[in-house]
Amino acid sequence: MADCVAGLDAGGTKTVCLISDYSGQPLGRGTGGPANANFVPEALALASLRQAMGEALAAAGAAAQVAILAVTGPVPEGLVLRAASELLPGVALLRLDEGEAAVLAEQPRLDRQGGPRIAIAVNAGTGSLASGFVTRGSGGRRDEIINAGGWGALLGDEGSAYWIGVEAMRAAVRSLDGRGQATSLVPAIISTYGLSRLRDLVPRIYGGDLGRREIAALARVVAEQAYQGDEVAAAVLRGAAHELALMACALIRRLGLEQEEFGVLTFGSVFKAGAPLLEPFTAEVGAVAPRAQVIAARREPVLGCLAAALRHAGIQVEDELLRRLEQAR
């Protein structure tokens, strides 16, 4: 079975690999841990890549021979090549912008439904990154890509799950000190991390016990508290929405799209917070570009990686093919 392609989404929390044949029939799926070598040891990132690729290959079967691997995410190309040389010898490697992968997964569906052309994609997961591009034709073919954000936890990542987690902890300690508004985030954080008291956060944070992944996981707790009526938690989500909208609007202005009709694609775990985050985000984007339509992604970006690999092999990628690939979930 020589005619296979693979897609790999290497993120800050998890890594996903999918393998399909040239007809779009899913053959195997694998998952691994974080692969962002800026925040995890290189050995762990490499192990995550090997695990995801290895599981996908095992599911695809011994006869599967992958010719093209399309990769997205903040993972060094050298690490991907090391893992691929062991598991996918002779494979051709394609690199994709994170937003580009998301668009390739979603644009065929929108084309079929008569939806707008996606010009901006905003990713808010463990980290955050916005991508802006000029697309030509169907399927999200891009002519140029520019970015806002993606600077990492110390320099940026505003609006990301990690940023939300840090802001929530700051709000909680200010509340406990009497420097801030009372909030249910205090007991929620104590419960989430199994603390005896909030001050026990200090050795857990500075001792490295609570790392980037664990802090980012707090974003879900913030959303829960916001839905239960906690104003401080809701304010944290509004702050995240504002930061993400700033990225999108910066790209809108740089591309001169203020008066155009286009789509703004949102993807990543943070946007699962729903209305408390999406409504202010949509309002801020609409204030700059009134004809813009905010669209929530329905498909994993790794499907866009597979679409890119298939296109590189000369295969036309339609929405029906992507729907078949979704069966690999």
Image (cartoon, rainbow, N blue to C red):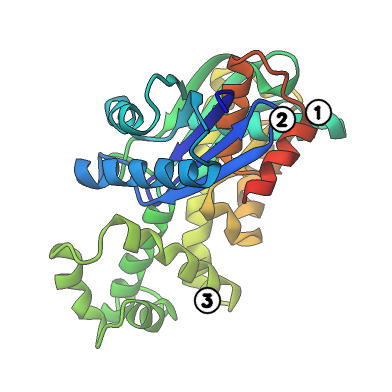
Front label number (3 vs 1)? 1
The picture places residue 305, in percent across and down from the top left corner, at 55, 30
Q: CA distance from mark 3 to mark 2?
A: 37 Å
Question: What is the three-letter code of the residue carrying label 1?
Answer: Asp
Q: Mark 2 touching mark 1, by CB under 8 A?
A: yes
Please name the residue shown 81% across and 28% down the image. Answer: 111
The residue that label 2 is drawn on is 107
Residue 166 shows in this picture: no
User: What's the distance in space between the residues labelled 3 and 1, CA to CA?
Assistant: 40 Å
Residue 233 location, x and y as percent?
Answer: 48, 69
Front-most of 208 and 71?
A: 71
Q: Residues within 10 Å of mark 2 (few under 14, many from 20)?
A: many
- Is residue 7 or residue 62 the one in the foreground? 62
Separation of marks 2 and 1 at Cα, in angstroms: 6 Å
Q: As shown in the figure, which amino acid type bears the numbered disc 3?
A: Asp
Residue topped by disc 1 = 111
Q: Does residue 187 appear in the picture of this structure?
A: yes
Vertical order, 183 against 13 (above or below): below
Does 154 sit above or below residue 70?
below
Give the number of the disc on residue 230: 3
